[in-house]
C-alpha cells in the first residue's frame, strides 16, 4: 500500500476552522461537565490529521502555546506551513503518518491531543497507534478531543456509503477524481430514487440524499470514499480510550447540557435511573438519534466541588462574537426554542455589548444593575447557551506577541482573498481562535484599506472585483447577470458589514 494507506487523497480537504478545538473552549467544556479543567498558560498541543491546517494555525497564532501536528498528505502540510510561516507561529507540523509520528523519540508530553474528523476514517491499526500515543504522551490532567460517526444516527445511511464506494471502485473514472465523485453521487441517487420500497421504508434517506447536493466534493470524498470507514458506538470508543487511562467528561457542544430542550420528560426519567456512565451516554445517543459525537476526555478526571465550579465560571472572561443586532430572536433546540428576549438572556446580551463589546467576566456581569437580581447559575446557563450556539466565546487578555501574530495572519488571509476564495476566517487575539468572515466581507475590508468607506463605495468595489475575475453574485444558486441586479445584491451586505460586522471585528481585534 502507498503512503495514503487507502485514505482518499485525490482531492484535498476543505479549509474549515473548528472552534471546538480551541484550547480555551476545551477547558470550558471540561468545566461545564463538572470537572476540574487544567490551569496553565504554557502548554503543548497536538493535532493529529490537521488537514489544511486552518485550526492549528489560527490557534497557534492566537494563543501563547506550542503547537504540534502531523498529516501525511504533503499538499496539506505545504499549505499549513505556508499559513504558519505567514504569522511566525510556534508550530512543528510534520508530514508523517500517525504511525511514523508516534515512533518519534523527540516528542514532548502534551497537554492537549485533538483529532477532528479522523477516528471513523482510519484503520484499526491506526486507532490503536493513536491510543498508544495518547497513553505514552498525554500529561496527567491532559485533555483529549475526538469526534466520530456514531450509531444510531448513521445506521440508515450506511448503504449510501457502501454503494458509492463500490461504484467508485468498479466504475469510477479515476483519471478525474471530481468527476468520479459526482458520478458516484449521481449513481447512488438514481438507484435510491428508483428503489421505491427502500425510499418508502427509510424516509430519512430522501433528506440525506438531498443534503449531498449541498456538500462540496472534498467533503463527500473524505466522508464516503475512504478505504477505511467505521461507525462506532460511544461504548466502543470509551473502552478503547480507557486503554490510555482516559475518562469521558462531556461534549464540546455545550447546548447538549440543556437537558429539558434535548430529552423528553420520559427520556429524562430513563436517564435519571441509569447509574453507569457508558450506558447513560449510549442511551442519550439513542434518545437523540445521535449521528456525530464531539467528545472530551481527560487523563485523571476530577469532579469539581460546587464552590470551585462557581468560582471558575465567575472568573472566566466572555465576549459576544455576533453583534447584538445580528442575533436571532430565539435559539432552536431539538425540543423547542429558547427566546433571547427573555429577561436573563436579554440582560446578559445587553451587558456584554456595553463598552464596545469589551470582554467581561461572569462576576462582572453579576454586578451589572440589570443582572443584580439574577442568580449566578442563570447567568452561567445563559453563557452556556450563547457559547454553545456560537454567538459568544471565552476571551483572553492577549499578549503583544499574540496580537502581532494575528495581525500578520490576517494580512495574509486578506491578501489571499484577492486571489482565491479559500479561508473565510480572521484570527482574534481576544477569542484565541478564528472568527468566520465570509469572502465578500474580506473583500469589503480590502476596499476599506483602499480608502473606500460608504455602502456605495464598497458595493462598487466588490462589483468591479467580481468583473475582473469573471464572477457574479448568485440568487437561488444561479448567477445574476445585470449590473443592477449584482449591485442590488451586494449593497445590503455592504450596509450590514459597515453597521455590525466592522464594530464586532474591531471589538475582537481581528482588524
Ligand atoms: C477528514 S480530514 C480532517 C482534517 C482536519 N482535522 C479537519 O477537521 O479539518 C482527515 C485528515 O487526516 C489525514 N490523515 C488520515 N489518515 C492519516 C494517517 N494515517 N496519518 C496521518 N494523517 C492522516 C488526512 O490527510 C486528512 O488531512
Image (spheres, rainbow, N blue to C red):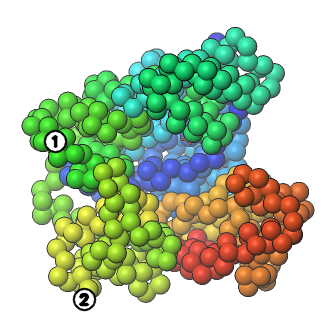
In the depicted structure, whether residue 199 falls above or below residue 41: above
Left or right of 313, for residue 411: right
Indicate yes or no: mark 1 CB to ligand 1 under 8 Å.
Answer: no
Image location of residue 343, percent across then percent down = 27, 77
Q: Which residue is mark 2?
A: 369
**Cα distance between the residues tagged 1 and 2:** 39 Å
What is the quadrant of residue 383 in the picture? bottom left
Where residue 95 appears, as percent x and y from the top left, is 63, 33
Residue at 59% x, 74% y: name it.
501
Q: Quadrant of the N terminus?
A: top right
The answer to whether residue 74 is left or right of residue 340 is right
Instruction: Characterize the local packing of mark 2: few (<14), some (14-19) or many (20 or more) Cα atoms within 10 angstroms.
Output: few
Percent of width and height locating residue 101: 53, 29
Q: Nearer the viewer, mark 1 or mark 2?
A: 1
Count how many numbered circles sit on residues in the image.
2
Quadrant into which the C terminus falls: bottom right
Q: At x 46% / y 30%, what residue is drawn? A: 203
Q: Are marks 1 and 2 in contact (CB under 8 Å)?
A: no
On residue 266, which mark appears? Answer: 1
The picture quadrant for ligand 1 comes to top right
Amino acid at each position: 500500500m502507498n503512503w495514503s494507506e487507502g485514505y482518499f487523497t485525490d482531492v484535498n480537504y476543505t479549509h474549515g476552522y473548528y472552534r471546538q478545538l480551541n484550547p480555551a473552549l476545551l477547558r470550558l467544556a471540561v468545566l461545564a461537565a463538572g470537572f476540574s479543567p487544567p490551569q496553565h498558560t504554557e502548554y503543548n498541543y497536538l493535532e493529529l490529521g490537521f488537514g489544511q491546517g486552518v485550526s492549528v494555525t489560527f490557534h497557534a497564532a492566537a494563543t501563547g502555546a506550542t503547537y504540534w501536528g502531523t498529516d501525511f498528505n504533503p499538499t496539506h502540510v505545504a499549505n499549513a506551513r505556508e499559513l504558519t510561516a505567514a504569522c511566525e507561529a510556534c508550530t512543528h507540523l510534520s508530514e508523517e503518518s500517525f504511525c511514523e509520528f508516534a515512533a518519534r523519540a523527540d516528542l514532548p508530553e502534551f497537554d492537549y491531543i485533538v483529532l477532528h474528523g479522523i477516528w471513523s476514517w482510519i484503520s484499526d491499526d491506526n486507532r490503536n497507534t493513536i491510543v498508544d500515543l495518547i497513553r505514552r504522551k498525554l500529561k496527567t490532567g491532559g485533555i483529549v478531543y475526538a469526534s466520530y460517526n456514531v450509531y444510531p444516527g448513521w445506521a440508515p445511511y450506511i448503504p449510501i456509503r457502501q454503494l458509492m464506494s463500490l461504484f467508485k471502485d468498479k466504475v469510477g473514472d479515476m483519471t478525474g477524481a471530481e468527476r468520479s465523485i459526482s458520478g458516484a453521487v449521481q449513481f447512488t441517487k438514481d438507484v435510491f430514487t428508483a428503489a421505491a420500497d427502500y425510499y418508502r421504508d427509510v424516509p430519512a434517506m430522501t433528506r440525506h440524499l438531498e443534503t449531498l447536493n449541498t456538500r462540496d466534493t472534498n467533503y463527500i470524498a473524505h466522508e464516503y470514499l475512504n478505504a477505511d470507514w467505521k461507525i462506532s458506538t460511544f461504548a466502543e470508543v470509551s473502552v478503547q480510550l480507557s486503554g490510555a487511562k482516559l475518562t469521558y467528561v462531556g461534549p464540546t457542544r455545550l447546548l447538549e447540557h440543556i437537558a429539558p430542550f434535548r430529552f423528553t420528560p420520559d427520556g429524562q426519567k430513563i436517564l435519571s435511573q441509569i447509574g453507569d456512565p457508558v450506558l447513560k451516554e449510549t442511551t442519550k445517543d439513542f434518545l437523540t438519534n445521535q449521528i456525530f459525537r464531539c467528545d472530551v476526555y481527560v487523563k485523571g478526571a476530577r469532579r469539581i466541588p460546587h464552590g470551585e465550579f462557581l468560582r471558575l465560571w465567575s472568573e472566566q472572561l466572555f465576549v459576544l462574537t455576533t453583534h447584538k443586532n445580528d442575533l436571532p430572536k430565539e435559539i432552536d433546540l431539538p425540543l423547542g426554542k429558547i427566546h433571547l428576549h427573555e429577561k436573563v438572556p436579554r440582560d446578559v446580551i445587553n451587558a456584554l455589548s456595553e463598552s464596545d463589546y469589551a470582554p467581561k467576566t461572569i462576576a462582572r456581569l453579576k454586578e451589572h444593575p440589570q443582572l443584580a437580581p439574577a442568580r449566578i447559575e442563570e447567568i452561567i446557563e445563559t453563557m452556556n447557551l450563547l457559547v454553545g450556539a456560537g454567538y459568544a466565546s471565552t476571551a483572553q487578555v492577549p499578549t503583544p506577541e499574540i496580537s502581532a501574530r494575528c495581525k500578520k495572519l490576517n494580512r495574509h488571509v486578506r491578501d489571499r482573498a484577492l486571489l482565491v476564495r479559500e479561508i473565510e476566517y480572521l484570527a482574534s487575539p481576544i477569542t484565541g481562535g478564528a472568527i468566520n468572515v465570509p469572502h465578500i466581507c474580506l473583500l469589503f475590508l480590502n476596499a476599506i484599506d483602499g480608502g473606500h468607506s460608504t455602502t456605495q463605495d464598497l458595493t462598487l468595489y466588490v462589483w468591479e472585483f467580481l468583473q475582473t475575475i469573471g464572477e457574479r453574485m448568485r440568487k437561488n444558486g444561479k448567477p445574476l447577470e445585470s449590473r443592477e441586479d449584482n449591485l442590488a445584491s451586494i449593497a445590503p451586505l455592504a450596509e450590514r458589514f459597515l453597521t455590525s460586522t466592522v464594530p464586532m471585528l474591531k471589538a475582537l481585534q481581528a482588524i
